[in-house]
Amino acid sequence: MTLNAQTLSDSTVLHPLNEVEVKASRPSSFQSVAPLQTLQAKDWLKMNALQVSDALKYFSGIQIKDYGGIGGLKTISIRSLGANYSGISYDGIIVYDYQTGQSDLSRFSLENLQSLTVSIGENDQIFQTARHRASAGTLTLVTPAFSPENEKKEIKAALKGGSFGLFNPSASLTTSLNKTFSLNVFGEYLQSEGNYPYKQPSEYNPDSTSIKHRNNSDVTYYTFEANLSGKFNNEGKLRLKTNYYRSNRGIPGPAIYYNTYSGERSKDQTVFSQLNYTQKLNRLFDFQTNAKFSYSSNDYTDKNNKYPDGLLETFYYQREYYLNMTWLYTVSEKLSFSWANDGIYGNFSNSFQYCPFPSRINWLSALSGKYELPRFTLTGSLLNQFTEDRKRIDHSTKSNWHLSPYLGFSVKPSETLPVRLRGYYKNTYRFPTFGDMYLSSVPNNNLQPENADQYNFGVTFATSFGNRFSLLSFSGDGYNNRIKNKIIALPRSSMFIWSVQNYGKTDIKGLDLNLKMQFSWNKKLVCSLSGAYTYQQVLDKTDKDSQMYNQQLPYTPRHTASGTIRIETPWGDLNYTLLYCGKRYYERINRPEYQMRSYADQGISLQKNIRWKSHQWLLTAECLNFSNESYEVVRSFPMPGRSFRLGVKYNYEL
């Protein structure tokens, strides 16, 4: 999959008082119908980002739940809808987990990515799979595109090391096999002890703290990926990808008084192969097909004296078979339609004696349309979802189907002013995961799907003022999300027995702001600034007589912000980053004793590029959280304090 239109073909014409005409290319987010935020590889290199989750923290409207350290679980939530509503697309195909409905972001390597894009609602690209339409928002991960026409060989290598035992090498090779096919091979290894220090307040004196070290937070993983790209004389394009990932990580427990022991470990293994083929049939029709097979396993162990033999070990397995076909009908340059059909079969099992061995069949069909003028864009889609769950243990079946509409627009009211208005409505239908229905203490086979309505209205502005002030862009979006039949866990007969039920209604109101500026003092000195701010009011609207009514949901700050400053000089580049998170609560009742304090995480880095003939080196030195701020994203899971990293990247073209 290739990412379309990183810059807009049309440009805004400005008429200053001296009647000099100024033109500037526009970011794709300026013209998009729904909020769209993109980072290229060169951007996250300057953000002290080691993992995908590190880069995403600088997007507005995005929440990353981080359980601490490199080895901790990391998931993405878009506009507080929850990780289950967030689709992750890897080179055009959605990644899915049948057990939890959410994927760990740490399994994807930044070293093997070309761009990160978050689209909230739906993006303007209608030539894609139907499964993309089923999410409230999508994180799109794109690896570099390889063309067989380029006969050069390229070798890349990188090495990072730093605090807490970090050792992270990677390498890739790209070569042209013949005039039709090219091959890329990538591999990465990461190891970290994760034994960082943290401050723990005294139980009896909050003003007194002691220094402790995180334990059982080590991680070791490696991943290999091979890409075969083909370009044929009939204008057909083929891409075949195979990926293997294996990890062994400790699961750090909560940092509580008198007990820092954690004996939980997780060994994960994932392998998948996916194929994408696109073909331009004639002037009017384009066709693409996607196919994928994936297999994953998890070996979970917990060493604890509470078990009869001092050890609990459980195995989890899941498989998925996926096939998609999409047709694009281009009526004219202004009007186009697409029809996408996806068939998916997945099954899940574990080593429990009472495992029902569930499987799920999904049929998704999406009819989409787009009408585009220089100053007006209208997109719409209708998604039909049919789901059938089967249990092998009793041969029972349960089916459900739903129609989800979407409609969005973007309009430029003035021909001369670089301002656009945009808005959309989208319905999203989330089916319960196998973990929701079968893995709770009290299984609930009758869970109903969640139903979410999304409303968004925003404004974008982008312009330039000559070579000295090359970019000024701003976007602001107000939104309202309403969720019905929210799936939550509730205590049953005691605090040790929980059940998963449809109980909640949630109302989400928010505001996302983004600002980017770039200016030059001269040809050798360039400064770039970016900032993002999010305000969210996420209220429980379930029961007016309940204490939880109109209470802010747990772990949802009202205010979050991020910013970067980059200064590029002939001698090297200096980068500063800031992440701010406001106060929030860890319980459903917003009492002062349940409040978590705000924090600001600041980082600084230096970079130096060295070029000699076909060789290129990039040297980096980073200091993360240089103010040594002590904070938690999830209560009792402390984040690392001040740490350091050194890195080198090497690129050579034969």
Image: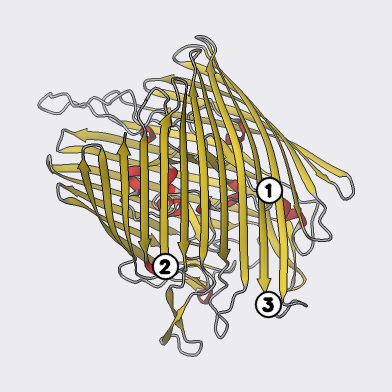
User: Disc 2 designates what residue?
Assistant: 165
Residue 514 drawn above or below residue 638: above
Q: Mark yes or no: residue 201 visible.
A: yes
Residue 367 lies, in percent from the top left, at 61, 24
Label 3, label 2: how far apart the Cα atoms are: 27 Å
Q: Earlier in the sequence, mark 3 or mark 2?
A: 2
Relative placement, left or right, of 368 versus 3 is right
Give whichever of discs 1 and 3 has the lower sequence position.
Answer: 1
Quadrant of res 252: bottom right
> Which class describes the residues within 10 Å of circle 3: few (<14), some (14-19), or many (20+)?
some
Q: Which residue is mark 3?
A: 304
Label 2 element class: helix
- Specify whether 487 is left or right of 376: right
Local crowd at mark 1 within 10 Å, few (<14), some, or many (≥20)?
Answer: many
How many tags in the picture? Answer: 3
Residue at 79 percent across and 56 percent down: it is 444
For residue 573, above or below residue 330: below
Name the residue located 46 percent from the left edge and 43 percent from the top edge: 186
Mark 2 vs 1, N-terminal side: 1
> To which quarter of the image does residue 169 belong?
bottom left
Examine the rendering and report whether any part of residue 543 can be seen: no
Look at label 3 and name its amino acid. Answer: Asn
Q: Amino acid at mark 1?
A: Tyr
Q: Nearer the viewer, residue 599 or 585?
A: 599
The image shows residue 579, relative to residue 410, as above or below, that is below
Q: Residues within 10 Å of mark 2 (few under 14, many from 20)?
A: some
The reply to whether the C-beta atoms of the residues labelled 3 and 2 are less than 8 Å apart is no
